[in-house]
Image (cartoon, rainbow, N blue to C red):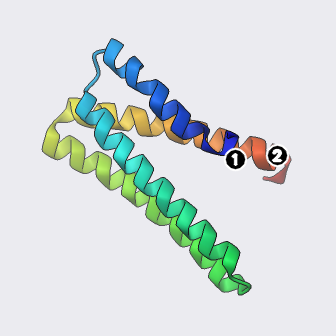
């Protein structure tokens, strides 16, 4: 359950967006970008776990991490340019919130001393 805390926070953020009068289109764009990158992360992790070749494992995990960052970053930029700054800001706030939850869970799962 802790592994998917970001998805729980994604669902809990919707009423906050409504109450704060933030763009629901921004929420939708941010949510889709986050779920796409999360699906990619799960796929890349599965491929890395299935491999016994160290280069493949590193390639899957590092390549996936870079691609996921680009997905979220380019989505935010495109959203702001095409749909407006308010929509882009809402998408940015959501993705930053979800990333904060995601990275915090990773620290808890692996232990901060593993850094």
> Which residue is denoted by mark 1 in the rendering?
106
Residue ID at (62%, 67%): 45
Give SS at disc 1.
helix
Residue 15 image point, x, y percent: 39, 19
Pointer 2 local density, CA inside 10 Å: few below 14, some 14–19, many at least 20 = few
Residue ID at (26%, 37%): 88
Residue 58 image point, x, y percent: 65, 76
Residue 14 image point, x, y percent: 39, 25
Pointer 1 local density, CA inside 10 Å: few below 14, some 14–19, many at least 20 = some
Quarter residue 90 falls in = top left
Q: Residue most toward the top?
A: 19
Image side of residue 25 versus residue 48, left or right: left
Numbered tag placed on residue 54 in the rendering: none
Q: Is residue 9 above or below residue 3?
A: above
Image side of residue 22 versus residue 2, left or right: left
Q: Residue most toward the right?
A: 113
Which residue is nearer to you in this view: 103 or 11? 11
Q: Quick check: marks 1 and 2 in contact, CB under 8 Å?
A: no
Residue 89 image point, x, y percent: 30, 32
Image side of residue 105 versus residue 6, left or right: right
Question: Is tag 1's residue or tag 2's residue first in the polypeptide sequence?
Answer: 1
Which residue is nearer to you in this view: 115 or 32? 32
Residue ID at (63%, 83%): 56
Whole-Å distance between the Cαs marked 1 and 2?
8 Å
> What quarter of the picture does the N terminus occupy?
top right
> Which residue is denoted by mark 2 in the rendering?
111
Q: Is residue 115 above or below residue 27?
A: below
Residue ID at (36%, 37%): 92
Q: Is residue 12 above or below residue 44?
A: above
Q: Residue most toward the front?
A: 1
Image side of residue 12 versus residue 32, left or right: right
Give SS at disc 2.
loop
């Amino acid at each position: 359950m802790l592994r998917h805390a970001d998805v729980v926070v994604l669902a809990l953020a919707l009423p906050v967006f409504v109450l704060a009068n933030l763009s629901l289109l921004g929420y939708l764009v941010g949510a889709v970008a986050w779920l796409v990158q999360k699906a990619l992360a799960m796929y890349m992790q599965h491929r890395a776990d299935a491999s016994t070749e160290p280069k493949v494992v590193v390639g899957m995990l590092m390549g996936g991490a870079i691609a996921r960052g680009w997905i979220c970053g380019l989505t935010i930029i495109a959203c702001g340019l095409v749909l407006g700054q308010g929509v882009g800001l809402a998408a940015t706030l959501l993705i930053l919130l979800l990333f904060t939850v995601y990275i915090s869970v990773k620290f808890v799962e692996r232990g901060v001393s593993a850094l």
